[in-house]
Amino acid sequence: KAGVTQTPRYLIKTRGQQVTLSCSPISGHRSVSWYQQTPGQGLQFLFEYFSETQRNKGNFPGRFSGRQFSNSRSEMNVSTLELGDSALYLCASSQPRGLDLAQETQYFGPGTRLLVL
Amino acid sequence: SQKIEQNSEALNIQEGKTATLTCNYTNYSPAYLQWYRQDPGRGPVFLLLIRENEKEKRKERLKVTFDTTLKQSLFHITASQPADSATYLCALDISPNAGNMLTFGGGTRLMVKP
């Protein structure tokens, strides 16, 4: 099976702009989670989508949003970018619980590195 | 507040030795704990999961212990190799429902010298 893919891999934006990142999960995976990774704060959970519905949400401002499509692909959007949004954004997919012994395992993509100038 | 702590300092060991990494948590009662490996510029890769009713789990040269009384997990790599050099992250799922909501420790960078 192909792994989790994320596009684009690298992105440069300026303050005030908005950005949309895309994630394609492993085939058959219905849960998609997004994380932000920075040197100062480490890996932090943004939100999780399952069957096109946001199921969990981390402690991030409303500028961060996401959605999931019927084919489980997901996008996240950051509006009004700030310098502090510069980070590696990681997407992870997993099987729904009950269908896989390792259902708790998160399979991460390579990430999108966002630089805000 | 809820917290997961890993030794933030890099761990330098000689090839062939056993590396031991620590993960401590507070204010959680996790059903399981996970360990991931992350190489620079790449996403984390799942290594091992240990449940609250398991004291120890092994996979090849890897061993994880889980002490829910001490709120601590230890991650061991035996016969370490330079290829084991990476950052290792422990994670707990704090989702209030059946979803996924991993909280990660800050990671420990392991350097195995030949």
Image (spheres, rainbow, N blue to C red):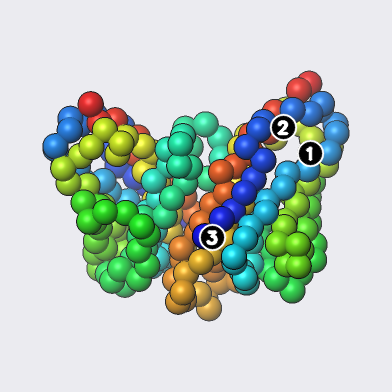
Q: Residue at x 76, y 23 (%)?
A: B113
The image shows residue B46 at horizontal and vertical percentages of 59, 52
| A43 shown above or below A105 | above
Ranked by sequence position, the earlier of labels 2 and 3 is 3
**Quick one: label 3, few (<14), some, or many (20+) residues within 10 Å?**
few
Q: Kindly state the secondary structure of the residue where label 1 is placed.
A: strand
Frontmost residue, B4 versus B76: B4
Q: Amino acid at mark 1?
A: Ala
- Disc 2 or disc 3, which is closer to the eye? 3
Ranked by sequence position, the earlier of labels 1 and 2 is 2
The image shows residue A13 at horizontal and vertical percentages of 20, 31
Q: Residue at x 16, y 42 (%)?
A: A80
Read off the residue under disc 2: B11
Left or right of B88 in this view: A28: left
The image shows residue A111 at horizontal and vertical percentages of 39, 41
Q: Residue at x 50, y 75 (%)?
A: A97
Q: Kindly state the secondary structure of the residue where label 2 is placed.
A: strand
- Disc 1 or disc 3, which is closer to the eye? 3
Residue under mark 2: which chain is it in?
B
Q: Amino acid at mark 2?
A: Leu
Ranked by sequence position, the earlier of labels 1 and 3 is 3
Q: Which mark is residue B19?
A: 1
